[in-house]
Amino acid sequence: MPDPLARAAAEALDARDPLASFRDRFVVDDASVIYMDGNSLGRLPRSTEARLHEVIRGEWGGELIRGWDHWLSLPTEVGDRLGAALLGAAAGQVVVSDSTTVNLYKCAIAALDARPDRRVILTDSENFPTDRYVFEGLARQRGLELRMVKSDPDDGLTVEVVAEALDDDVALVSFSHVAYASGAIADMAAITELAHRAEALVLWDLSHTVGSYPVELDASDADLAVGCTYKYVNGGPGAPAFLYVRDRLQGELRQPIWGWFGQRDQFEMGPAYDPEPGIAQFLVGTPPVLGLAAVDAGVALLAEAGIDRLRAKGIALTTYLVDLHDAVLAPLGCSIGSPRDASVRGSHVSVRHPDARALCAAMIERGVIPDFRTPDRIRFGPAPITTRFVDVWDALDCLRDLLAQ
Amino acid sequence: MPDPLARAAAEALDARDPLASFRDRFVVDDASVIYMDGNSLGRLPRSTEARLHEVIRGEWGGELIRGWDHWLSLPTEVGDRLGAALLGAAAGQVVVSDSTTVNLYKCAIAALDARPDRRVILTDSENFPTDRYVFEGLARQRGLELRMVKSDPDDGLTVEVVAEALDDDVALVSFSHVAYASGAIADMAAITELAHRAEALVLWDLSHTVGSYPVELDASDADLAVGCTYKYVNGGPGAPAFLYVRDRLQGELRQPIWGWFGQRDQFEMGPAYDPEPGIAQFLVGTPPVLGLAAVDAGVALLAEAGIDRLRAKGIALTTYLVDLHDAVLAPLGCSIGSPRDASVRGSHVSVRHPDARALCAAMIERGVIPDFRTPDRIRFGPAPITTRFVDVWDALDCLRDLLAQ
């Protein structure tokens, strides 16, 4: 019997991985680096490097202002492609522009304005900081109540916790679909249904989901969603975020930042704001063309790999990681800070240890890159499209070695 | 005597141009294109192409998440360099991030919240559309009055027009420093002083100014300013905008979009929003790293040329353009839609003609690229750092030829 804890077992898993060849589609200059932070910043696809060169040199340098003939439609076109490949969203409901935080703000105000008689924003005390800060600001500015459930820091949000916090004063419910610390997945369809029964609107943050999990926004009856593109979508540092508004709500909801890219007949430069009828009304200012091109290339690569195959590999990678942890790291004082049930776990896993901060720094010294999340988490994000099983083995072996010293 | 209307005169001006060599610092693939739209989208500097390659391939591709060790400070560092080179702003007052429209929105709310007992936003009916739309939205959302002066469409805003519209109910005064249609320059110091006497705050839009005119924000006692970087700063399509908040106001003003990039000790991810004490509180979400790098490279190139030399060349180019127009185009039905006094004219000139739209399209067909602004303006933006006097001659000769047919 081969030893399931030996590196050879990881090599065998890689040999059977149907997505293995996708790693060669990325720039990997230093093969000795074990990258476990694809959930913070995805690697650079070779196709993106080529596309950016073309946009910079060919389009900006060569077409000059004439580039806007095709750049103008990038936010909606890339949004449609992202929505189709990764979000389960039919065309005309997604745009790519601005940051996740600005998009959260726009969507939250649109929702609150649609429920003017209600005074509660419901979120999670364990939600990603920028989400909490945006809602805290809006609650303060509008005299609303910011109501926080507290999800389990390792196992995430349950439907029951949400049900208890909902009442007929809740205007907006907003959670992260995959929790940034634990990777726990919330039940989008069930929570959305609960919120709808209370006549609240729901805004999902898909930052830690998109590109790693086949989210079904339309089928889940979701209202609003946002998310970033520099993690599993591999759009590059600070790439523009996306925003989804369900078609049935586009006639009712209005976002607050009235800018010329949301204007119908933009270049008529008319005297009064007259927003586009569809999803384009959620655009604001001039969109970042380089970032949009990178997102587009990243989406195309994920679409080619297929979100279902990416999800399957994500489950396999994180399950292998948890199994190795239990055998090798648990005896050294570590514990898993993520769901053990792979069906409710995203593509990253937290390993908890009291010395997590120092251990993270020491791992990075040795060329293994996870990330640290306060106070005690070493977060491993083995992005399915670029990470090998041997990378997981090497990363955990590095941590084992440090702990054994 | 040489003929002042002959192309040879333009060649002689180019031969004496101290900035002539800077054209070679830009990508000019098709030398037959006469580019007169540097005021909409500046050309690609060679140094920017190299810097972007390094950021994409070396930093994103090679450093991966570790790039954030230095990317994190880009918005304030690039802001400081932009402020020093082009805005007359001491360090700690400028950040680069988000779009001009989002920055306008943040600054406008910060100002309105600081004048809670006043109910008027004062702007110009001839202001750039996105500025008007943002203020229209805020007036609607807050139950305020949007008061519009009407500046002269060709000669711009006078101090007298502003003085008449000011009263003690005005919270915020906001104008473009250089008018997008005419290129007329508003008197920043005088209008700011007037507004301050009325105890209003002033927000300047410098989109058509920055990189072409030595604006002095600190010396003018300005409160707030925003502007874009894809025009004369040559930051590329959709490059991030800047935002200036005077140091003395940073303790008092609060922007409305509370995000994690404005948070003190961002990666502690604390429970409550606790903004940075300085200009960084005006940041929101993850900044666009590629765009920031391009802005930085663009600023460095303008700093090397020197804003005073750029302004001198801008005056020379536009004066030459007006002179040629008067001799050659005025007899064919054109008129100047910009100030004739170069000291109150930015680096672009509008030529008005009833058939402007069709003429613009025909010029572009012939490889001469101005832009059209509704209803009757052909806007020539001879960016000082890349435009030759022969380009001005060739562009106007093309228009003359079309009109003569």
Image (cartoon, coloured by chain):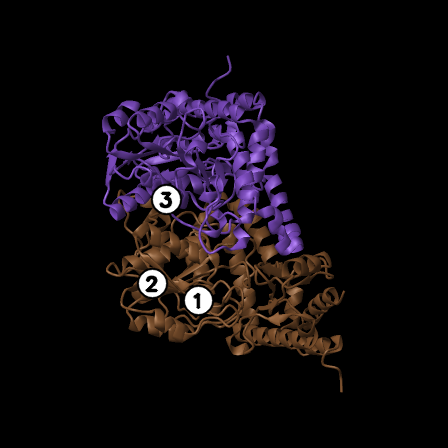
Chain colours: A brown, B purple
Question: Circle 3 sits in a helix, a strand or a loop, which is it?
Answer: helix
Q: Chain of mark 3?
A: B
Give the Cα distance between marks 3 and 2: 23 Å
The amino acid type of the residue labelled 1 equals Lys
Question: Circle 2 sits in a helix, a strand or a loop, which is it?
Answer: strand
- Mark 3 vs mark 2, foreground winner is 2
Q: Are marks 3 and 1 in contact (CB under 8 Å)?
A: no
Check the image and report above or below for A314 versus B325.
below
Give the Cα distance between marks 1 and 2: 17 Å
Viewer-side residue, A403 vs B176: A403
Q: Residue at x 61, y 60 (%)?
A: A371
Q: Position of residue B303 (x, y in %)?
A: 57, 30
Disc 3: which residue: B105
Question: Circle 1 sits in a helix, a strand or a loop, which is it?
Answer: loop
Picture quadrant where residue B338 is located: top left
Disc 2: which residue: A172
Instruction: Assign the N terminus of chain A to one quadrant of the image.
Output: bottom right
Check the image and report above or below for B64 versus B91.
below
Q: Position of residue B6 (x, y in %)?
A: 48, 22
| Lower position in the chain sequence, tag 1 or tag 2 | 1
Q: Chain of mark 1?
A: A
Disc 1: which residue: A150
Q: Chain of mark 2?
A: A
Q: Residue at x 49, y 28 (%)?
A: B88
Check the image and report above or below for B47 versus A132.
above
Q: Are marks 3 and 2 in contact (CB under 8 Å)?
A: no
